[in-house]
Amino acid sequence: MKLTYYPGCSLQSTATEYDASTRAVFEHLGIELTELDDWNCCGATPAHATSQYLSVALPMRNLIQAEKAGNDVMAPCAACYNIMKAADYQIRQNAPDVAKVNEDLVAIMGSKYTAGIEIRHPLEILSSQEWLRKIKEKVVRPLAGLKVVTYYGCLLTRPKEKVAFDNPEQPVTMDKLLTALQVEVRRWSYKTDCCGGSVALSQTGSVETLVAKLISEAQRAGADAIVSACPLCQLTLDTRQDKVERKMPVFYFTELMGLAFGVATAQKWLQSHIIDPESALASVGKGCDAHA
């Protein structure tokens, strides 16, 4: 299986552990990732507030590049995935404004986007029955004993007409994947609540209140940690626990996959975390010790 890989800005800066773990896990599974040539920022959450035109043109340029590469494009960042899916959806719906942007890009790119590829998230790919079976086969250090809640955030599964690979309110793809690693996934009602990440600098107090609520509810569910699929969510939850008395680590799902697979570099990824994840890993049985 070959995919064009779009890391996006966060995975090259504040979420390097997400990038490293994604690349390592996919290589371990035999899935070939080729980084998108000459990619640009997708505009993420702020572009639409400053320029509607750029909010479409930025992801569209990446999609034109990806289409030239010929493979489906995979975007691990929930914001990047959401933005690219939205642009793709509008092209497929023949939205006039987006069609104009597409035509304008011909002068810059030499071609336009024809929606001949799919934009996919790692969870969408790895949660299929085929890949879940292969993931179970690759586990050498089962993470039995680790209790988590899965946190998808507000961008990965909504709006449902544009990003529809999972249930918009009660997604289960990450739950299935972690269960394959023998992680115990606890039930809670906050999988898709907003963490406030996009206003973390302008409304810090409000964000700390949101994070405190999420951490409190995760602890009430009996979790040792939260597992995320979004770099903005992970960063916000990991750095905004000032109002939390008992801190809780926040993993990327790919990091736990790497630990379960016995990837040699997995321990290095955890050193980038603010809240020490070792407290959560201490609950894992001796046979799945992350230091082994």
Image (cartoon, grey):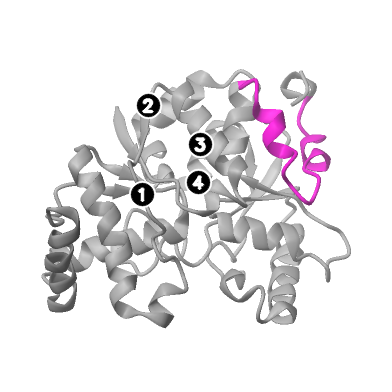
Q: Tell me the kind of residue under disc 2.
A: Ile
Residue 118 lies, with reference to residue 292, above or below; the image says below
Given residues 183 and 41, the one toward you in this image is 41
Residue 250 percent location from the top left of the image: 69, 51
Residue in front for this viewpoint, 10 or 181: 10
The residue drawn where x is 69% and y is 61% is: 237
Which span of residues is magenta-colored?
262-285
| Residue mark closest to the camera, 1 vs 3 | 1
Q: Quadrant of the C terminus?
A: top right
Residue 22: assigned label: 3
- Which comes sooner in the sequence, label 2 or label 4? 2
The residue indicated by pointer 2 is 31
- Residue 171 falls inside the magenta stretch: no
Residue 91, by quadrant, is bottom left
* Residue that numbered label 1 is attached to: 39
Report the side of 24 relative to 141 (left or right). Answer: left
**Does the CB distance between marks 2 and 4 fall below 8 Å?**
no
Which mark is drawn over residue 174? Answer: 4
Q: Compare marks 3 and 2 and give the one earlier in the sequence.
A: 3
Structural distance between the alpha carbons of marks 4 and 1: 27 Å
**Image quarter of residue 130:** top left
Is tag 4's residue or tag 1's residue first in the polypeptide sequence? Answer: 1
Q: Alpha carbon of mark 1 to alpha carbon of mark 3: how far?
A: 18 Å
Q: Dot 4: within a 10 Å radius of its alpha carbon, few (fewer than 14), some, or many (20 or more) residues?
A: many
Please indicate whether residue 129 sits to the left or right of residue 202 in the image: left
SS for dot 1: loop
Quick check: 239 above or below 252? below
Q: Secondary structure at mark 2?
A: loop
